[in-house]
Amino acid sequence: MDRTGARPPEALLEAAAPARGAAVAAPAASAVRIDSLGAWYGARKAIEGISLAIAPRTVTAVIGPSGCGKSTLIRCVDRLHEVTPGARVEGRVHVGDVDIYAPGTDPVAVRSMVGMVFQKPNPFPTMSVYENVAAGPRLRGSRIPRGALDDLVERNLRRAALWDEVKDKLGRPGADLSGGQQQRLCIARALATDPAVLLMDEPCSALDPISTYRIEELMRELAGDVTIVIVTHNMQQASRVSEWTAFVLAGDDGIGRLVEFDATEQLFTKPADPRTEAYITGRFG
Amino acid sequence: MASPALAVRPALALGRRRVVDRAMSVLFVAATVAAVTPLLLVVGYIAVQGAHGLSIALVTQLPAPVGEPGGGMGNAFVGSAILIAVASAIALPVGILSGVYLSEFGGGRFGDVLRFFTDVLTGVPSIVVGIVAYTILVVPLRSFSALSGGFALSIIMIPTVARTTEEALKRVPLTIREASLALGVHEWTTILRVVIPTGLAGIVTGAMLGIARISGETAPLLFTAFGSAFWQQGLLKPIAAVPLQIFQYAISPYTDWHEQAWAAALILMLLVLGLNVAIRAVTRTGFRTVR
């Protein structure tokens, strides 16, 4: 089954209907399609004219120097950018065949089909390991019988390769785990809402090398059934985990633009743009 | 200019620094001592004066008629408890909800205005609050009452509760809120089920601070609760309160009343002190959960 938007939540079907009519224009062949995306923080423009088509069930890395707008870019795919006061977005983004910025599309519904893992592990401090994983379905008001919820928690902790380490301390606060375990808990929490796309915003930057390795391994496994977009400032990481890489760079005006988007191997060995080459050979950034 | 001097006479420069360092340390310690001394003196003096007036009768019995020995001010302790309960019933919902509003939606101009008025309210003399409650409740109801006393106290309590709630919720990291929103959880559910539980220790602290703040208030009760020599007779009748009773006994000419006033002051002070210790305990565990 093609998971990419094959099962948009019911709430979205209505909003998606017009996009459906124009299915040729927005084919579900890509898991995420970004068309001339721009984003502002108040009067300051952070990114501009970014277009990307992300293939389903792949890992795509977004690389670039600090402040180039790579985090802003993926936050736009989750409609999380607009949470910041004064922030706004132009252009279009399709997740599966859902036009997520179409008028009438509920951001809450968009966020239920796109998962996000943040830079710093952020398990809910008042919740146990179990409750953290169950948080998505529970806080969204799903009435899931206890047994099914137990299964859901176990399944997703297994998907996040954390089950064996925490199966005896499901009742302990999530914040009691180590940093790397907390980040995998956050991955399990995001997976538990069964997203078609998982966005990761520098998920390893606060972690030690061993935890980083674990999470990279996990990403490769997860790519079997989830489309992953990872923002990273670590080029080795991008080359290890991703099949596709997008290089974003801020110009002199401070606005981030897409410089190059290609297969990871191609981009790292035979970059088409001299700026990409300069970046990956460490001449700036 | 300074560096050649330093190079030539390093020992002297260092000596000067050491003297300044010593002097500043002494200054800070002295200031701390000066700040804490009055507290210790008050606590010590009240303890000495109040200790021998302590008795079970003080908190269980009604005042004895003038001239008769014994009696207590049990009615005042019950009355204070009722006044605090009435005040909390009004101030906690209003204060906590205002705090949630200020923290979560108070970014605009209206939030600033609200915040300003809250701060002004904190500074209003409590006797004025008493007069306001008198005008709003005592005059129309044609009677001093527990209700009007509790209402006056709640006005003093609301800003404390609102601002501590606001601060507690603002300390909840943005990334926790975003984690919840990113799961597809509605904003209101996020506030109710994620943000408020995370800041709960701070909210509880605010409530307790508010109670500590009002439990010693006397002025706002003068024209509202008024005081009474009997057990409480309902929310619409005058009611006794410990600070009022202390005031009335202290200005009386009877030595046994003076003694009871000291003892009551000691109990009141210990209760507030206990409340503050409890607040510290709550905030400490609170910080642990937030981290």
Image (cartoon, coloured by chain):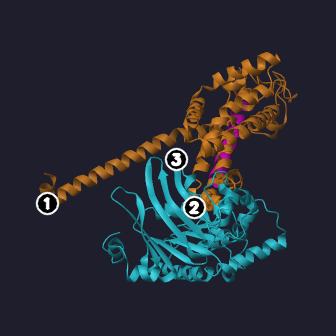
Foreground mark, 1 or 3?
3
> Looking at the image, do the residues carrying marks 1 and 3 touch, with CB atoms under 8 Å apart?
no
Count of marks, rendered view: 3
Q: Which residue is mark 2?
A: A93
Q: Residue at x 27, y 51 (%)?
A: B19
Q: In the image, is B226 to the left or to the right of A201?
A: right
Q: Which residue is mark 3?
A: A86
Could you say which disc has been placed on residue A243 in the image? none
In whole angstroms, how far apart are the C-alphas of marks 1 and 2? 65 Å
Q: Residue at x 80, y 28 (%)?
A: B146
At label 3, which amino acid type do we have?
Answer: Gly
In which quadrant of the rendered view does residue B183 lie?
bottom right
Mark 1 residue element: helix
Residue B57: horizontal and vertical position, in percent? 82, 37
User: Are dots 2 and 3 on a single chain?
Assistant: yes
Rendering colour (chain B)? orange
Q: Chain of mark 3?
A: A
Query: Earlier along the polypeptide chain: callout 2 or callout 3?
Result: 3
Q: In this picture, which residue range is highlighted in magenta? A: B258-281
Q: Which residue is mark 1?
A: B7
Mark 2 residue element: strand
Q: Is residue B187 above or below residue B55?
A: below
